[in-house]
Image (tube, rainbow, N blue to C red):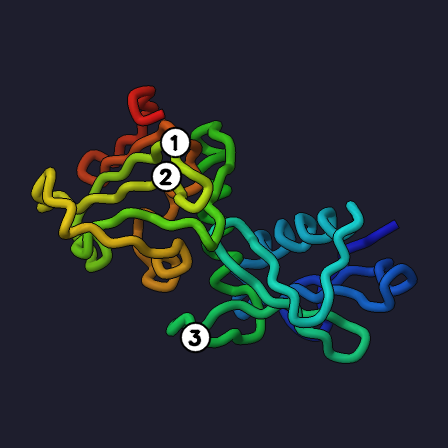
């Protein structure tokens, strides 16, 4: 039986039981206690994934919703690292990952929606001003597998001018701490409008 226990010392959790199967246990650490609850969720999620026969090895990349982690082995433990703010290297812990995961899970739970975050490798269509804090609206279309389905447009977007659109990966939104990241785990067909704070289902985008 696999158990998950609190880290001591440290803020986070560690598995107990995988050592006899794979020769390692798995550590999940955050820097702040405010993310501890979601750190536990992530520990349970990844532990369940491993128990289903998916061993995670040293230097293996793990997709966690719209975020990406990498496993690093040190002695008898594998710890998880996440991207730094420049998205060019990994740093210890899952602080940002837990924050994004937790905010999106909480939002979907509150609105009784399926939790469907885009994968880290899927693309988002966005206007540049949406990245700089402009009020925006978004819709998640039914799309091909390499696309997340999300189109996010700032309120100053000139409709029909596709030259002003960019393609970016979800983790760049998370790094920038954009307010609308909480909406991005909503399923296809759902839309949001920051002007009113409204979310709604629109069958026409399916």
Distance from disc 1 to disc 2, alpha carbons, whole Å, reads 6 Å
Label 3 crowd (10 A; few <14 / some 14-19 / many >=20): few
What residue is shown with label 1? 142
Total tally of numbered discs in the picture: 3
Residues packed near mark 2 inside 10 Å, few (<14), some (14 to 19) or many (20 plus)? many
**Residue at 43% across, 49% down:** 122
Is residue 94 toward the left or the right of residue 138 in the image? right
Q: Position of residue 62 (x, y in %)?
A: 61, 58
Screen quadrant of the C terminus: top left
Residue denoted by label 3: 88
Dot 1: few (<14), some (14–19), or many (≥20) neighbours within 10 Å?
some
Is the residue under label 2 in contact with that under label 1 (CB below 8 Å)?
A: yes
| Secondary element at tag 3 | loop
Which residue sits at x=39%, y=44%? 147
Q: Earlier in the sequence, mark 3 or mark 2?
A: 3
Q: Earlier in the sequence, mark 3 or mark 1?
A: 3
């Amino acid at each position: 039986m696999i158990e998950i226990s609190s880290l001591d010392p440290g803020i986070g959790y560690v598995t107990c039981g995988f050592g006899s199967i794979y020769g390692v246990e798995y550590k999940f650490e955050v820097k702040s206690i405010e993310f501890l609850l979601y750190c536990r969720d992530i520990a349970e999620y990844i532990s369940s994934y491993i128990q289903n026969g998916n061993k995670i090895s040293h230097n293996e990349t793990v997709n966690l919703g719209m975020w990406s982690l990498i496993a690093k082995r040190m002695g008898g433990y594998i710890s998880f690292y996440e991207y730094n703010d420049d998205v060019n290297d990994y740093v210890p812990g899952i602080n940002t990952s837990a924050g994004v995961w937790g905010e999106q899970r909480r939002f979907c739970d509150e609105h009784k929606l399926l939790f469907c975050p885009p994968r880290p490798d899927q693309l988002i269509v966005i206007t540049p001003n949406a990245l700089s804090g402009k009020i925006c609206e978004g819709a998640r279309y039914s799309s091909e597998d390499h696309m997340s389905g999300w189109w996010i447009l700032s309120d100053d977007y000139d409709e029909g001018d596709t030259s002003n659109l960019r393609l970016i990966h979800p983790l760049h939104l998370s790094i920038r701490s954009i307010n609308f990241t909480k909406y991005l785990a909503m399923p296809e067909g759902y839309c949001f409008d920051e002007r009113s704070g409204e979310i709604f289902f629109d069958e026409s985008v399916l």
